[in-house]
Image (tube, helix red, strand yellow):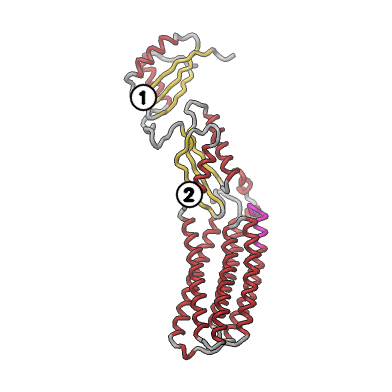
């Protein structure tokens, strides 16, 4: 990867320099703000819920605790996921973010299920449910306001730096805000005499936490098994490649996600009679077009002279030196040492061009070559040209 060559040295400190400094700094700042807010809310909710006898507030406190753990996980992934590519990780370390999201999703799912089971067990003995203290309602209202403000702050930063993991972490705050709203309803119902509503609210919060966790785990798993981009984005990339001058066709376009970026592989068809250097130039132009027009980390372009999905394979055809020996044997003559031998492997056969010095009888040689291709197992066409010796 052209932009990562400086990460291959032996300076360990350089390896921890983020590949995207602005994104790294913004993510670290927003995550530290979230850690401080969630730490304060976790303590307030757990202490308030315990002494105020509110199971729903305790459940919401565990939700805040899960977000606190998620923030710590985000800090770790943000630091290590932004390291430059190295010899062992030539595509970078972005998948660390994906692994962190998977761990986070699984943890949230487990916490949600545990809360749901706990609330269900307590609901079997409603006579033991006690009225909650009034101040638990104020704690829940304060939590709702804090979570909504935190969500808007984090989402704005996540969109600015285009980080999928930061967007996910921002929505954790929004899910906590939603769960706090449920807690407010449950505590209010309990204070009005419907004591069981506090446990119902705790169960609902558990379901919300579990659902959010399963979503994150599912998305992370889809990325880890190399799920491709959305059909609309793949279609846009295909159109970009086809619009590059010199690209005659396109097949085997493959994509896969890597955190907020994507990797693209494509086989493009070019005129089979152009030079290697021109084919390489077209490939580089195609690669640059995709990188400039789409949110893609890298593009691997393979040049094909024909659609090798539909054409006959060329693997059985001999290599250059063997073909040259075969041709001279059939011609019953040795070609001059300064003859240029240009080969085109197309549709399972060989089209050859012989560039001969002026001293050779090109007409006689062309006649022999025409007779050979009539029944030759390898050559489909042989064209003879005469060129003057370079000055």
User: What segment is highlighted magenta in the picture?
Assistant: 18-28
Determine whether, in the image, residue 11 is placed left or right of residue 374: right
Q: Main secondary structure of the magenta part?
A: helix
Q: Position of residue 348 (x, y in %)?
A: 37, 29
Q: In the displayed image of the protein, which residue is found farthest to the bottom?
A: 127
What secondary structure is found at the residue carrying circle 2? helix
Q: Nearer the viewer, mark 2 or mark 1?
A: 2
Is residue 287 left or right of 374 when viewed as pictured?
right
- Assess whether mark 1 and mark 2 are in contact (beta carbons under 8 angstroms): no
Of residues 78 and 245, the one nearer the viewer is: 245
Identify the residue at image location x=38%, y=35%.
310
Q: Quadrant of residue 167?
A: bottom right
Q: Residues within 10 Å of mark 1 (few under 14, many from 20)?
A: some
Give the number of the disc on residue 391.
Answer: none
Q: Identify the residue at image location x=64%, y=77%.
A: 142
Location of mark 1 (residue): 378
Instruction: First in sequence, mark 2 or 1: give its number.
Output: 2
Residue 303 position in % (x across, y down): 49, 35
Q: Position of residue 385 (x, y in %)?
A: 47, 15
Instruction: Tell me if residue 230 is in the magenta stretch.
Output: no
Mark linked to residue 231: 2
Is residue 249 shown above or below 80?
above
**Residue at x 37%, y 21% (from the top left corner):** 326
Position in image of residue 302 (x %, y %)? 49, 38
Is residue 120 rendered to the left or right of residue 144? left
Furthest-front residue in view? 192
């Amino acid at each position: 990867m052209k932009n990562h060559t400086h990460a291959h040295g032996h300076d360990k400190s350089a390896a921890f320099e983020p590949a995207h400094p602005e994104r790294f700094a913004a993510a670290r700042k927003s995550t530290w703000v979230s850690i401080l807010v969630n730490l304060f809310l976790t303590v307030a909710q757990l202490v308030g819920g315990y002494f105020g006898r509110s199971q729903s507030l305790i459940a919401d406190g565990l939700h805040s605790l899960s977000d606190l753990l998620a923030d710590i996980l985000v800090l770790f992934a943000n630091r290590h996921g932004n390291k430059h590519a190295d010899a062992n990780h030539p595509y970078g370390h972005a998948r660390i973010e994906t692994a962190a999201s998977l761990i986070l999703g699984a943890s949230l799912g487990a916490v949600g299920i545990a809360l749901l089971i706990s609330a269900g067990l307590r609901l079997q003995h409603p006579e033991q449910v006690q009225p909650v203290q009034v101040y638990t309602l104020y704690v829940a209202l304060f939590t709702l306001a804090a979570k909504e403000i935190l969500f808007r702050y984090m989402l704005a930063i996540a969109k600015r730096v285009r980080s999928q993991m930061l967007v996910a972490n921002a929505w954790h705050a929004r899910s906590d805000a939603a769960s706090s709203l449920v807690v407010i309803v449950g505590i209010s119902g309990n204070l009005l005499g419907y004591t069981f509503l506090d446990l119902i609210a705790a169960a609902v919060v558990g379901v919300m936490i579990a659902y959010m966790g399963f979503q994150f785990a599912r998305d992370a798993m889809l990325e880890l098994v190399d799920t491709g981009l959305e059909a609309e984005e793949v279609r846009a990339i295909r159109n970009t490649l086809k619009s590059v001058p010199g690209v005659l066709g396109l097949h085997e376009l493959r994509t896969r996600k890597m955190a907020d970026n994507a990797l693209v592989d494509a086989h493009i068809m070019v005129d089979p009679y152009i030079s290697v250097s021109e084919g390489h130039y077209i490939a580089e132009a195609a690669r640059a077009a995709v990188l400039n027009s789409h949110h893609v980390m890298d593009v691997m372009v393979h040049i094909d002279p024909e659609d090798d999905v539909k054409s006959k394979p060329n693997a059985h055809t001999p290599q250059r030196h063997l073909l040259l020996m075969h041709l001279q044997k059939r011609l019953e003559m040795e070609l001059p040492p300064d003859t240029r031998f240009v080969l085109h492997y197309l549709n399972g056969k060989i089209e050859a061009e012989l560039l001969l010095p002026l001293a050779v009888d090109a007409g006689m040689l062309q006649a022999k070559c025409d007779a050979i291709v009539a029944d030759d197992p390898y050559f489909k066409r042989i064209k003879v040209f005469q060129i003057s010796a370079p000055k």
